[in-house]
Image (cartoon, helix red, strand yellow):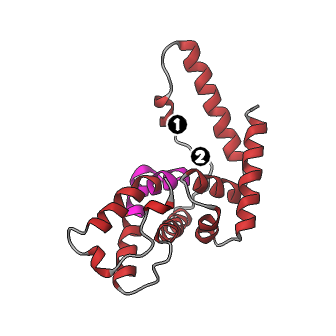
Amino acid sequence: MSGDSVPFTLSASAFSTGSREAAKLFEELRKPLLRYLVCLGLSPDEAQDVSQDAFLSLHRHVTSGGAQENIRSWLFRVAHNQARNRQTSYDRRFATPLDASRDDMLDHATPERELLAKEKFRQLQTAIRSLTEAERECLLLRAEGLRYREIGEVLGIATSTVADSVDRAIRKLAEKCNV
């Protein structure tokens, strides 16, 4: 998904009942935001709660006349901060960023293929866990389609740092997964 399809500015009237602009924004960003939050380590239910809170915050922000440049990165930033607060309050760490239930998505054609696919998935999970927190967050946001500039805004770091972190993360994953 490219950020070009998301409106860069919304008027307060865009959030009126039945607004097409607000509905389109919600439809375009809801799933990527949920995926990102689950990859950060939240349960699907927690991710749903944080996502809902982030969209409510966006509504309040826009209707109160707040800045409207790059709503997409603003929304991811709010959700990111809320996820961090939730994780801190529950004393969580990023020990298991990928859910074991994803094993269900593997091809079950033969027992051998299933075993190989599960082993590759475990290897990828281990490799992702070995990344630094910054590398993991940059890579996850990039996987959700955010540009380096947007990732920098979400995480509060320089664009060059984002580029270095993504590059380093990809190299580490390739090395650990023998790609």
Q: Position of residue 56 (x, y in %)?
A: 35, 72
- Which residue: 41% across, 52% down? 31
Q: Amino acid at mark 1?
A: Ala
Callout 1–callout 2 Cβ contact below 8 Å: yes
Q: Label 2 neighbourhood size at 10 Å, few (<14), some (14-19), many (20+)?
A: some
In-image side of 97 versus 47 (left or right) = right
Check the picture and name the quadrant holding the C terminus: top right
Q: Who is closer to the viewer here, 150 or 58?
A: 150
143 in the magenta segment? no
- Which residue: 40% across, 74% down? 58
Q: Who is closer to the viewer here, 173 or 16?
A: 16
In-image side of 31 versus 89 (left or right) = left
Name the residue furthest bottom: 65
Q: Label 1 neighbourhood size at 10 Å, few (<14), some (14-19), many (20+)?
A: few
In-image side of 30 versus 91 (left or right) = left
Q: Quadrant of residue 28?
A: bottom left
49 in the magenta segment? yes
Q: Position of residue 20 (x, y in %)?
A: 27, 65
Query: Magenta segment range?
Result: 33-51
Q: Main secondary structure of the magenta part?
A: helix
User: Where residue 96 is drawn, which disc sits there?
Assistant: 2
